[in-house]
């Protein structure tokens, strides 16, 4: 007779697979449901409302009394779209420049932070490489949230990084390239800010943004490559210096929506659910088969089998001896 432990092997195997699948599903879901940056609007700052910004240290207070602008004040002015003088950034280190030479076939080496919208060979190379990526590939690579403060104070640490960021869509304009590259003749230059109008950034797209996006209204999430900072004169004839990205994906988001990793979106989630249902079905089938075998082995002989046994046409089945037990001997004759 089959041992109970041996019979339960398929059940234990199915349970182990089921537990493993639940762990694989629950772990990414727990991390993916974490918010990926501030998706909602923030209240206007004191500088945005015209009030003087409070100083946080004695040096800043002394600089304010002397009529000098501290780095914190310069950054706040940049966040509000006013940079009368070009910003000064920390110089790129040897390791950073060596890394740029390896990224995107060296496309980051021929441009500097704070320049205007000049089209260099590296810019064209980035457009061509970004076009080759699928939207799903860019989504999976863009796990890091772009910090606007870091992009403005130390942009070299972010150059060439895949990032994502949320904000309010500010509209787009079509820009004809100086020369076509990989079939690309135009880019769509778009703007985005936080909910209070601060922390502006500019990004170029190879394809036009969806027509459903309304300027100054629709909250969006973008995914792409941080290129550098750009300095230009706005329509209000004010010099602006902001982060500059090349973006592949843009989508409207709902209030309070959380970011989900690519492996759990769309077809990936369907495959995981289907695998879970299949394992549950297999587990139920194995349990039913084990119960059915036990029932058949314990059932009473049918009437037909009983008649055959009494007539001597069919011998009743004798239980099997254990494999290592000695053969039974006939009883001694009296």
Image (spheres, rainbow, N blue to C red):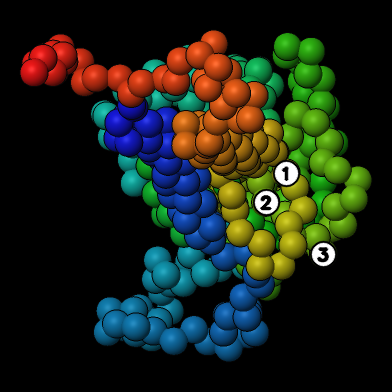
Q: Which residue is mark 3?
A: 217
User: Helix, strand, or loop for circle 3?
Assistant: loop
Of the two numbered discs 3 and 1 in the rendering, the one whose residue sits closer to the viewer: 1
Marks 1 and 3: in contact by CB < 8 Å? no
Q: Quadrant of the N terminus?
A: top left
Residue 172, given in percent of the width and then of the height, sits at 82, 46
Mark positioned earlier in the residue sequence (3 or 1): 3
Foreground residue among 209 and 191: 209
Instruction: Say which residue appears at 84% left-offset and 36% top-offset.
Output: 208
Image side of residue 319 versus residue 45, left or right: left
Question: For the residues carrying marks 2 and 3, which lies nearer the camera in this image?
Answer: 2
Q: In the rendered image, is residue 63 in sight? A: yes
Q: Are marks 1 and 2 in contact (CB under 8 Å)?
A: yes
Report, in whole angstroms, how far the alpha carbon at label 1 lies from the one at label 2: 6 Å
Spot occupied by residue 155 in the image (x, y as percentages of width and height) = 44, 45
Please tell me which residue is depicted at 33% across the width and 40% down the height of the picture.
91
Residue at the spot x=29%, y=82% of the render? 57
Q: Which residue is mark 2?
A: 221
**Residue occupied by mark 1:** 250
Instruction: Give the CA distance from mark 3 to mark 1.
Output: 15 Å
């Amino acid at each position: 007779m089959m041992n109970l432990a041996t019979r339960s092997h398929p059940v234990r195997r199915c349970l182990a697979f089921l537990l493993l699948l639940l762990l694989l599903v629950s772990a990414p879901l727990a991390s993916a449901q974490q918010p990926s940056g501030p998706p909602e609007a923030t209240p206007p700052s004191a500088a945005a409302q015209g009030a003087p910004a409070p100083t946080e240290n004695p040096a800043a207070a002394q600089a304010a009394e002397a009529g000098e602008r501290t780095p914190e004040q310069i950054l706040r002015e940049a966040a509000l779209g006013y940079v009368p003088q070009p910003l000064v950034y920390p110089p790129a280190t040897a390791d950073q420049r060596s890394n740029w030479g390896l990224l995107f076939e060296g496309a980051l080496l021929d441009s500097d932070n704070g320049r205007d919208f000049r089209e260099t060979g590296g810019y064209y190379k980035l457009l061509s490489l970004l076009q080759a990526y699928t939207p799903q590939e860019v989504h999976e690579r863009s796990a890091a949230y772009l910090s606007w403060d870091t992009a403005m104070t130390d942009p070299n640490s972010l150059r060439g990084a895949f990032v994502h960021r949320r904000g309010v869509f500010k509209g787009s304009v079509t820009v004809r390239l100086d020369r076509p590259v990989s079939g690309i003749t135009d880019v769509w230059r778009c703007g985005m800010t936080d909910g209070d109008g601060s922390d502006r950034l500019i990004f170029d797209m190879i394809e036009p943004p969806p027509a459903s996006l309304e300027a100054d209204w629709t909250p969006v999430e973008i995914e792409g490559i941080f290129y550098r900072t750009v300095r230009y004169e706005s329509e209000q004839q004010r010099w602006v210096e902001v982060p500059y990205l090349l973006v592949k994906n843009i989508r409207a988001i709902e209030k309070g929506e959380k970011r989900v990793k690519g492996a759990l979106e769309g077809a990936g989630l369907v495959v995981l659910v289907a695998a879970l249902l299949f394992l549950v079905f297999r587990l139920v089938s194995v349990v039913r088969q084990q119960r059915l075998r036990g029932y058949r082995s314990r059932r009473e002989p049918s009437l037909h089998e009983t008649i055959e046994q009494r007539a001597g046409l069919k011998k009743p089945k004798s239980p099997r001896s254990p494999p290592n037990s000695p053969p039974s001997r006939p009883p001694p004759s009296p």
